[in-house]
Image (cartoon, helix red, strand yellow):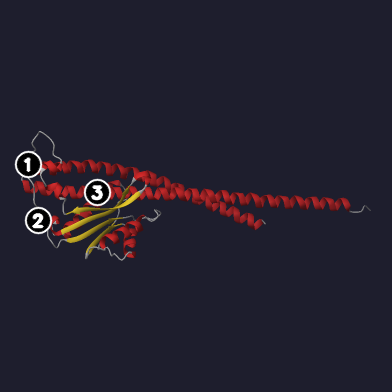
Amino acid sequence: MTQTLEALSRRTETLTSIRGIVHTMKTMSAINAVPYERAAESVAAYHQTVLNGLRAFVAKTGPIAMPVAAQAERILVVFGSDHGLCGNYNEALASHARAATEATDNTRVLCVGARMKDALTDQGLTPDTSFLPPASADGIGRLAGDIVTRLDEVGGGDLHNRVAVTLAFTRRAGRGQREPVMAPLLPLAPSLLSDPGHTGWQSRSLPDYTMSATPLFAALLRNHIFATVFQASAEALVTENAARLALMQQAEQAVEDRLEEVGGQFRLVRQDEITSELMDIIIGFEALKKKPSM
């Protein structure tokens, strides 16, 4: 009986410690998601400015026809996590990436996060390069710069004509859900380089620029690529922390339920022990009463 009570006490202490750890992880996930979400909103506004610059450039120069190589190398950039405790976050996206590459041959895979690398390997995809995810929102720019630099190396300095890039990441969906996304990055969508009536330039003011057209267009394209990669990375980090938060909430509820169950067992065993001790006392008292007097 005593050993059972001791075992239940130890189990209660263990579950209490686990509850504290889970609560800490849940709090950290909720706190970490906020700066990533703000970064995603900020880069979306910056990206819109870059797109307006592209529309203004096209409105000034006219539609741009850029040749696309028929044998452009295909690159898939997959954004995952470096830490666990986020459910099937990496595995679900890796499976989606595998399905997307089945229709194409010789796709080079770049991935973010050690756990995503393992998930892709399990799907039969061997990443060519693996990047470290940022530890904070300040590191998203570093990651986006590293990815753009790697893409530039693969494309030999001519990204639009030599590579076809797709970004695979998880984004937020309605009602707290998330969904995998395969977003084409390169070659550029024809709508970006077509006439301004289709690209959204609607102003009575005519756009103009003073610097040379070639370096200006190259800068706009590079900033468009950087902002798109930045936004995909920030969105992936937001959904990663949201997935971890949801999992920790489930784990916390499971621990609470288990604590209540163990607490009930402890009270029941303790009551049985008290009842047994009282019965021993009563039996002993009755035995003393029946003992013949000398």
Q: Mark 2: which secondary structure?
A: loop
3 or 1: mark nearer the eye: 1
Is any part of residue 40 visible from this angle? yes
Q: Mark 3: which secondary structure?
A: helix
Q: Residue at x 57, y 48 (%)?
A: 260
Q: In this view, which residue lies farthest toward the right?
A: 294
From this view, report whether residue 239 is shown above or below residue 126: above
From this view, report whether residue 191 is shown above or below residue 105: above
Is any part of residue 21 visible from this angle? no
User: Seen in the image, is 135 located left or right of residue 210?
Assistant: right
Amino acid type of the residue that numbered disc 3 sits on in the rendered structure:
Phe
First in sequence: mark 3 or mark 1?
1
The residue under label 3 is 230
User: Seen in the image, is 58 located left or right of residue 284?
Assistant: left
Amino acid type of the residue that numbered disc 2 sits on in the rendered structure:
Pro
The residue under label 2 is 67
On-image quarter of the N terminus: bottom right
The residue under label 1 is 60
Instruction: Tell me where residue 237 appears, x and y as whole percent.
Output: 32, 49
Question: What is the CA distance from the residue labelled 3 to the residue labelled 2?
Answer: 26 Å
Question: What is the CA distance from the residue labelled 2 to the residue labelled 1?
Answer: 20 Å
